[in-house]
Every structure is written in C-alpha cells, then in structure tokens.
Amino acid sequence: MTTYYDDRSVQVTSTAIRVDDRTYPLAEISLVWHRRGSRSWRVLAGRGALGAAMAGPLAAAVLGVGLAIWLDRSTTVTIAIVGASVLVGLAVGPVADFLFELLDRSYARGSRQRELWVRWQGRHVLLLRTGDALRFGQIYRAVQRAVEQATPPAAARAAARPARGRGRRS
C-alpha cells in the first residue's frame, strides 16, 4: 500500500481515502473534482493592513527628512531629525521580515474556501472543505494520483478518448 498524503484528519493511500472517521475505498470512487468559494474580504483586508504596516515606517522616515529640510533649523537640529528619520527607516528591516512572513503565510493559506468532491457509490460526496490553499492542493493532488493509479489502464484510455460526434470534423 502506498501513502500519498497523511495528516491528522486526512489520509490518502493506494486503496482508500480516509477523512476524519469516514473511509472511501478507491474502487468505489468514479469521479473527483473541486470547487472554489468566493473571496474572503477579511483576508484581503488583513493583507492590506500588513502592506500598510510595512510602508508606515518608511513613510515616517521620508516625512522626517522632508520636515528637517522644511524647518530650516540649524545644522545640528537638521542632522538630528534626519538621523532619527533614518533610524526609523532602518527599523523597517527586522519588522518587514516578520511582516513578509505573515504575508507569505496568508497567500499560502489562500483567500477562498476550497471543496474536494467525489462521486462515491453513485452519490456526490463532499470529502473536504478548507481555507488552507496549500494543504488543499496537496490533498487534491494526492487524491488525483491515487485515483489514476487505481484506474485500470484500459479504463483510463477509454476515459481519455473523446466521445463520438464531439471531436473536430475533418
């Protein structure tokens, strides 16, 4: 038996798919497909907030330099304001690394709910619904590989051939 995917709640093997406490033998699965839900505005707003948080210190540094020039004070005061602005700008480095990591994780999780469906014993069954795009992709590819490996070669060739009358005419 080959294991294609395995975590706490989903296991995909060469013989069956187990989701939570339900097991679906591959021999009883005839079709696999997925659906995407609508975008989550909460996730998109969170990404925008992360972008604003990254741009904030840089904007403050630029404003500080502009303020130092506009005030036209003594050289010492101008250098102090520019120096403080540069320090604020340099603070972006460590903060930006942390924020970029959060942004990267946000894109890995995705901004939509995804659903994995199968036709099992003639019925359409929702196997999995998740907002984690990376995990969903891994599970979906594992299910596809398992179903392809379980399909006999003759049946796979017949499924790949176009139906008569639907092909291109010569």
Image: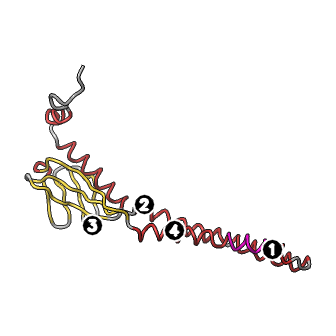
Q: Earlier in the sequence, mark 1 or mark 3?
A: 3
Q: Does dot 2 land on a helix, a strand or a loop?
A: helix
Q: Which of 84 and 14 lies nearest the eye of the viewer?
A: 84
Q: CA distance from mark 1 to mark 3?
A: 54 Å
Percent from the top left, x then y, of residue 141?
A: 30, 50
- Determine the residue positioned at 63% across, 72% down: 56
Q: CA distance from mark 1 to mark 4?
A: 29 Å
Q: Nearer the viewer, mark 4 or mark 3?
A: 4
- Determine the residue positioned at 23% across, 51% down: 33
Q: Which mark is residue 8?
A: 3
Q: Is residue 71 left or right of residue 129?
A: right
**On the image, numbered disc 4 is attached to which residue?**
48
Q: Which mark is residue 108?
A: 2
Q: Amino acid at mark 1?
A: Val
The number of numbered badges drawn on the structure is 4
Asked if labels 3 and 4 touch by Cβ distance under 8 angstroms, the answer is no
- Per the picture, the main secondary structure of the magenta-coloured stretch is helix
Q: Does dot 4 land on a helix, a strand or a loop?
A: helix
Q: CA distance from mark 4 to mark 2?
A: 16 Å
Instruction: Decide: few, some or many residues near mark 1? Use Cα within 10 Å; few <14, some 14-19, many ≥20.
Output: many
**On the image, numbered disc 1 is attached to which residue?**
82
Asked if labels 4 and 1 touch by Cβ distance under 8 angstroms, the answer is no
Percent from the top left, x then y, of residue 7?
A: 29, 63
Q: Earlier in the sequence, mark 3 or mark 2?
A: 3
